[in-house]
Image: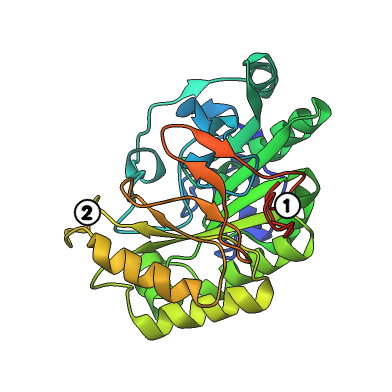
Amino acid sequence: MREAGFYEKLTDGRVRCGLCPHGCILQEGAVGLCRGMKNLGGVLYSLTYEQITALHLDPVEKKPLYHYKPGAMVMSMGSFGCNFHCGFCQNHAIALDPHPKTVALGIEDLARTARETPGNIGMAYTYNEPTVYFDMMLALAKLIKEQEEDNLMISNGFISAAPLRALIPYLDGVNVDIKSFDEGFYKREIKGSLKEVLRTITMLVEAGVHVEITHLLIQGANDDPASFKRMVKWIKALSPDIPLHVSRYFPDYRYTLPATSPARIMAFVREAREDLPYVYPGNLPTEDGGTYCPRCGHLLVERGYTVVNRLKFGSCPHCGQKIPVI
């Protein structure tokens, strides 16, 4: 455990957590909605600090980040807990399980693992929601930067502005989930807020952090075409260079709706491509996940069993179009 960096002491030994917009007010001995924060003696402690549930070397495309160092490998870590309660959670064993199995690993050990792993570009904070293990993430991100490596975060975007501002100087790339473009869906199915997620994405883009967006399309739940089109228009207005991943849902946790049909995914991908040049189908390995030049159509990054990057100094070798790929 470690004392949390963002909280407020209230009267009668209570504390208010400042990590996410829930702003949980905790009595002595109480644990926050995310299960990662606890009030002990009027002090808020991070229960996730140096507690690891997963540590793997992954392709950066798995995050998914398609426009950040294609073909690279990144050490990926997770802890436990989440500040959302999605009924379709695909990582519920660590995100929502009340008794997750963890291993104690110090941040120096994690940083050394990142540094000494051949071919690794840095650390990705993922698997469960990184906001829940924010204090560990921030401390480790500083060490990773000192090693001149990269910090990548895969997040639901439900984080308060102050901790996000503290983290941004150490972030290189982020993938944020937009679960739906309907505030009612967020409140009803997720126990969160779309407005706060959009604020996070805006702050990241305005700060110059590389951002990609994932939208898990659940047929019969969040696949209203009008809502999807509003999301696409919002992304385009913020930056048309943002890659969008339209990912196929499979039943998991409490959701028993059938898997989204590949045809439905591709219909939404085609719809989004009318406004955005970089839209990718997710969880559909038979579909083309390549990056094409929006000017001449040349295949620039080919993704299959291996990744082939044909970019030249960040531009299309065929027509010279500048491509927003790091």
The secondary element bearing badge 2 is classed as loop
Q: Is residue 234 above or below residue 142?
A: below
The secondary element bearing badge 1 is classed as loop
User: Where is mark 1, residue-wise?
Assistant: 315
Amino acid carrying mark 2 in the image: Pro
Farthest-out residue, bottom: 226
Amino acid carrying mark 1 in the image: Ser
In the displayed structure image, the side of residue 133 where residue 288 appears, left or right: left
Q: Nearer the viewer, residue 174 or 156?
A: 174
* Residue 108: x %, y % from top left: 70, 19
Report the mark closest to the observer, 1 or 2.
1
* Residue 238: x %, y % from top left: 67, 74
Crowdedness of circle 2 by 10 Å Cα count: few (<14), some, many (20+)? some
Quadrant where the N terminus is found in the figure = top right
Crowdedness of circle 1 by 10 Å Cα count: few (<14), some, many (20+)? some
Residue at (43% x, 65% y) in the render: 179
Q: Nearer the viewer, residue 296 or 281?
A: 296
User: Where is mark 2, residue-wise?
Assistant: 251
